[in-house]
Amino acid sequence: IPVQISRGCPHNCEFCASTKVYGPAYRHKSVDKVLGEIAEIQRYKKHPHIYFTDDNMLVHPAFSTRLLDALRGVGIRWMTHSDIGVANRPEILRRLYPSGCRKIVVGFESIVPESLKGLEKWKYDRLEGYADAIRTIQSYGVGVWGTFIVGLDSDDRSVFDRVVEFTLQNHLYGAMISVPTPFPGSQLYDRLEREGRILSRHWGDYTLWNVVVRPKRMSVEELEQGFADTLRRIYSPEASRERMEYFKQLLRHRRVD
């Protein structure tokens, strides 16, 4: 059940229109307001699974700790989005599982340095620490669901193997793979419009999975085939079984400090 707590994200990724819609300034509802909305949901479902739809829910440490303390014992399970910086905030990490959090979606965007540098410098500066950050977050019993874009301008066909290997080697809880999608208002749209590389202006095609942009270092067909193959490999029966066993062990020995 979706609930929005906050708006605004301090990052300005090239592909993202959220900062253009909501602005970079982070602002949030009060803790009491959030609890009131959850109580209303619980009138209809006693133990709901909540999807906090914020672009970057945990970016404000003081508010986050107050909210997580208040959510403890409320009787919900929940997921949200956060940037990788949460791995450096133990005061937040140790509160996540007790508050009901079971999954955090983290926008890694790319593990190809040249590609990531073109998207957002803040994330590029943290690329080398991605693996350690994932291990830290998940050690507290919270799965990391990574998001990746394949087919960026610096990506060749090796990007598909690289994303699969990164996902499996780091035991990600899951991964959402997308292709470059130039949403109106984003810097990506403005650049690709100037370059004449937008292939479709039918907004029904802008699903994040349909190829609507002419890639630079592969053909449209190669991107479509590589995208599909990447998903098949990440969610193969063998990979899914390994993931399940890993998280069983992780939850038995999760950190509580």
Image (cartoon, rainbow, N blue to C red):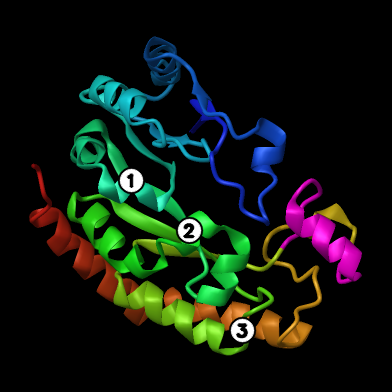
Amino acid type indicated by mark 1: Val
Q: In this view, does 214 lie above or below 161?
A: above
Which image quadrant for residue 178? bottom right
Crowd band around label 3 with a 10 angstrom C-alpha radius: few (<14), some (14–19), many (20+) = some
Q: Is mark 3 on a helix, strand or loop?
A: helix
Residue at 41%, 20% in the rendered image: 38
Residue at 57%, 33% in the rendered image: 8
Amino acid type indicated by mark 3: Gly
Crowd band around label 2 with a 10 angstrom C-alpha radius: few (<14), some (14–19), many (20+) = many
- Report the label total: 3
**Separation of disc 3 and disc 2 at Cα?**
24 Å
Amino acid type indicated by mark 2: Lys
For discs 1 and 3, the disc positioned in front in the rendered view: 1
Which image quadrant for residue 22? top right
Residue labelled with disc 2: 123
Residue labelled with disc 3: 226
Q: What stretch is highlighted in magenta?
A: 181-199
Residue labelled with disc 1: 86
Is residue 4 something that shows in the picture?
no
Residue at 75%, 86% in the rendered image: 221
Residue 183 located within the stretch drawn in magenta:
yes
